Image: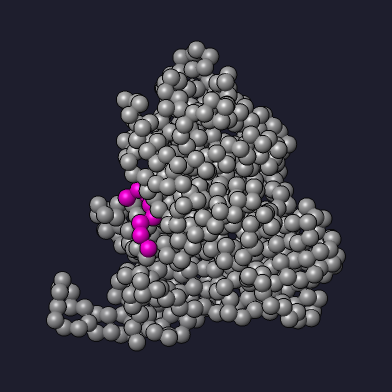
Amino acid sequence: MKVQKQIASAGYVSNGFINRWQRLIKDTVIPYQYEVLNDRAEGAEKSHVVQNFINAGKALRGEDIGDGFYGMVFQDSDAAKWIEAAAFSLISYPDKELENTVDELIDIIAEAQDEDGYLNTYFTIKDREKRWTNLLEAHELYCAGHMTEAACAYYEATGKDKLLKVMERNAEHIYKLFIIEKHEGYPGHPEIELALMKLYRLTGNKHCLELAEHFVNVRGVDTDYYAKEKLQRDWTVWGNNAEDKYYQQNFAPLKEQSDAVGHSVRAVYLYTGAADVASENGDTELLAACRRLWESITRRRMYVTGGIGSSLNGEAFTVDHDLPNDTAYNETCASIGLMFFASRMLEADVDGEYADVMERAFYNTVLAGVQLDGTKFFYCNPLEVIPGISGVASTHWHTKTQRPGWHACACCPPNAARLISSIGKYAYGENESTCYCHLYAGGGISFANGVKLCCETEYPYGFTVKYRVEQGSGRMAVRVPAWSSRYSVVKNGIVVEVTPEKGYVYVDISDGDELILTLDDTPRYVYASNDVPELTGCTAIQRGPLVYCFEGADNGDILPLALKRGGKLTVSDERTEQLDGAVKITAEAYRSEHSGSLYSFAPPAECPCEAVAIPYYTWGNRGENQMRVWMTEVR
C-alpha cells in the first residue's frame, strides 16, 4: 500500500532559508541544549538529564547515586531528541567534536541499561520494583520510543551501532513482556509505535513490526485498562485521571474513532504510528480511520498557523471550531507531530493536502517555537498576546509574551531541533520511478533511484523554485500548493501544460533538465468559517505559506486597529534585518479613538492609517509586545 517513502537521511543537504535554520540548530541550538542537559546553561531551567543517566548507571553497579533522580518522569526523552537532532546535523555538517560528544553521551546511556534490556532512569534510580506497573503515567514506552528514534538516526548518520544495539535489546525486552508474556496494557503516551516502525525498517526485525501493530490495535479494546491498573497500585506520578478515556484516546479502538480528542501530542503521535502500520501492512480499515482523524483535525480543529490542541486543560483538542486566539495552547510539539502524521499519510496517498498542512505547520507554529537567535523557545503558540494579561491572568498564564530559555517540561526545544535538522525527510519522497517534491527546500538531493537534483529557491520569500537534474532520469512530482491560485511550470525554457493530480504536477526528467515552478506571490486576506465564534468579523493575512501577525513594535497599540475590507496590501521591497531578513506587509487600516472610559455611549472616531504585519514565526523577538494574527475588519 505504501506509494512512496521519505528519502534516506543522507539524501539532502540544504541551502537558502532552510540552511539558515539548520545552521542555527548546528551552531547554536545543539551546543546550547547540551549545556542545558548538563545543567551548565546560565539562567535556564535545571535539566539534570545527563546526571540522571550517570546516576542510573551507578545504581545498577551498586554505587552511591548522590542526588538521585531529578525532573519529569519523561526526562530521558530530552537526551534522545538531542541525539537525534545532532545525528541529522552531522549528516549535513560533519563535526568530529560533536560526534565525540554524542559518543560520550551514548556511553553514559549504555551504562544505564539494566541486564534484561530495560532502560529508564526514573525507575532504575527510584524504584526498580515498580517497572511497568503504571503505563498510564510513567512514560516508559514513550522514553523508549524517543531513544529508539535517536538510535536509528545516529546509525544512519555515522554507521555507529552502540546505541542501536542498546535499543534493539530494549525492544526485545518490551516484546518479551507484552507479546510473549502477554502483559496487558498500552502506552499512556503514544510514541513508541512510530519509533518501532523506524527500527523495523532499519533492522528488518519483524518483532518491531508486530509490537507496533499490537500497541496500535490493542488500544481501546479494554477501555477500562488504566482504571484497573490504578487499582493495583498505591502510588502515582502526578495523579492522571484514569477514567478520562478521551484524554488518553482509549475510549474505543482506533479503527472505530472519528474525532481527534484528548491530549493533542499523544493523539498525533498515535495517528502517525497507526498510519505507518496501515501503509506497511495494507490495513485499509486502519488507514480509513486515520483519514477520518486527519479530516477532524485539519477541517475543524486546526488553527490557521497549523497549531493544534486549543485548550490548556489537558493540552488538548476540545470540540469542533473551538479555536480561541488569546488562550490557544498550540504546543510546538503538537505541530511537529502533525507534520509526522502528514508525512505518513503522504506515504500511503500522494495528495497535496497533506503536504499543504505540513508546510503550514512548519513555517508558522514550528519555527515560531524557536527564537531567531536559537536560545529561547515557546512551548505554547497563541495567536494573540497582550502584556499584563498574557502570562499573568490565571486563564492566560500559559501564553507567554517572550520565549523562556528552557522549560521544566522541556519536550519542545529538542523536538524542534530534530525536526528542523531532518526537514529533508519531509520535503522529499521517492519510489522506484518518481522523485516527490513535497516542500520547497533549497539544496542538493540524492534519491535512492539514482536521481540527483539541485534545488534553488528563496522560498518562502521568493516564489520561483528551480530544479536542475544533475544525474539520472525518471519522473518528478512537484506539489502545487492550494494557496497558489496561479502557477507555471517551465521545462528547459518551454512552458509545460500539465494538470495537477491531487495537487502534484508530474513531469518526465532526464540528466541535465531544468524545471522551474513559479508560484503566486500575492498577499491575501484569510477568512474563517462562520462556525468559529472567535473569528466573526475578523481577517488575517497570508502570503505564500506564511501567516502574518501585527506587533506593537511596528504599530504601537494594536488593540484599536482594524483592517480595511478589501484594502491594499503592500509587500515591502526591503528585508528586515532585525527579524533575520523577514519581509513585512503593510495593510490599509483604521485606528479608533475611544473616550478612555471603560464604557461609553459615544462611538469611537476612526482615522485611516497603515498597519504593518510581520511573519508570525518572527514575533516575540523585539521585546515584550502586543501581538495579533486575526484583526477586526471594517468597511
Position in image of residue 380 (x %, y %): 40, 53
For the point 39% across and 84% down, the residue is 565
- Image quadrant of residue 450? bottom right
Taking the image as shown, residue 546 lies to the left or right of residue 349, namely left
Is residue 318 one of those drawn in magenta?
yes
**Nearer to the camera, 220 or 275:** 220
**Image quadrant containing the C terminus:** bottom left
Q: Is residue 429 above or below residue 190?
A: below
Q: Is residue 154 left or right of residue 270?
A: right
What span is in magenta? 313-320
Q: Pick the residue in front: 460 or 150.
A: 150
x 61%, y 80%: residue:
486
Res. 37 visible in picture: no
Color encoding of the figure? one colour
- Percent of width and height locating residue 387: 30, 60
The main secondary structure of the magenta stretch is loop
Position of residue 479 measured from the top left corner of the image (x, y, whole percent):
65, 68
